Image (cartoon, rainbow, N blue to C red):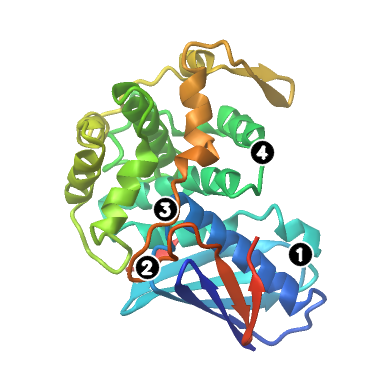
Amino acid sequence: MTSTLVISGSRLDVTIESGDWKISHDDILHWVKLAGEAVATYYGKYPVPHLTLKISPFDGVGVRPGMTWGRDGGGLIKIGLGTKTPPADLNDEWMLTHEMVHLSFPSVADDHHWMEEGLATYVEPIARIQAGQMPAIQMWTDLARDMRKGVPSPDEKGLDNTHTWASTYWGGALFCFLADVQIRQQTQNKLGLQDALRGILNGGGDIRQDWDLEQAFKLGDKTVGVPVLTNLYSKMRNDPMPVDLPAMWKQLGVEPDGRTVHLNDDAPLAAIRRALTSPDSAKPVQSGAHAAPQGAHASAIYAGRTRSASRKTES
């Protein structure tokens, strides 16, 4: 069965392959809609004008990692979904949002795969927070637990030359996190990585394009007016740049508290921490070739019925 959703003017054709589904197609489409709206919220529009999404069943629960390709007219995502997955579980599911983020950045050389995966790892929770789908404290709890996986050991050779799982996903996410904080520090908290990434996307840099990574970073830097991406890349591409994460958490006001964290609003960089995930950072959806008019609500079309909407990459 194939249904069509329209999010911020972009068409998403969703094929749910035949299987012994215990979850309704409407619940599956709602999951797709949540992911699409989160990404459109973060970028101000859906990254590509057309997406073909193929959902394959497997016996069990949960979601299996997907694969994303760029192709003429838009993108293609294939992802597996357990036929017995409870609908409520999909409200907290992150993998499809992760895959959709891949659509928003140009395809780069294999040595830079860390940027593709690290970007999706970092942006996914922020997009869901800005769309009202998860609380910010959940993201900070997860980052305080997992971001250390991306801190390089002294014998590593930088992001471009260390192709481990930890360096690819969490080293890339660490790069994005550091860039986000530094851009906000250097722009008096007026702009962040989100603005730089929108500049890259609006400049034509989506998954259908093959770009040099430095080309993308220069455009992002030009958008925000500070050379954070290119400078940080020069420090992290070939060398294991030391990062004092405990000191950063303290500055941002992310304090361990058992299995969660306490967010200290009196910390020196607390305002930056709040801005990183604030819905206010997600400016109105801009008009354009496949964007909804400013102030318009996104809508989703399910099999012809409209309802009001409240290169290959593997993940």
Mark toward the start of the polypeptide (3 vs 1): 3
Query: To which residue does mark 4 refer?
Result: 135
Q: In this orientation, which residue lies closer to the viewer: 61 or 206?
A: 206
Relative vertical location of residue 218 with respect to residue 186 in this rendering, above or below? below
The amino acid type, in three-letter code, at marker 3 is Tyr
Callout 4 crowding tier (Cα within 10 Å): few <14, some 14–19, many ≥20: some
Alpha carbon separation for disc pair 3 and 1: 30 Å
Mark 4 and mark 2 lie on one chain; the one further toward the N terminus is 4
Single out the mark in the foreground, 4 or 2: 4
Residue at image position (48%, 14%) is 251
Q: Which quarter of the picture shows residue 208?
A: bottom left
Task: Specify whether residue 141 is in view.
Answer: yes
> What residue is drawn where x is 20% and y is 32%?
227
Q: Are marks 3 and 2 in contact (CB under 8 Å)?
A: no
Secondary structure, mark 1, is loop
Q: Secondary structure at mark 3?
A: helix
Identify the mark at residue 43; answer none if there is no mark: 3
- CA gap, disc 4 to disc 3? 19 Å
Circles 2 and 1, Cβ within 8 Å, touching? The answer is no
Q: Nearer the viewer, mark 4 or mark 1?
A: 4
Numbered circle sitting on residue 312: 2
Q: Position of residue 189 (x, y in %)?
A: 38, 26
The image position of residue 165, as x and y in percent, is 45, 46
Residue 278 marker:
none
Classify residue 229 as left or right of residue 276: left
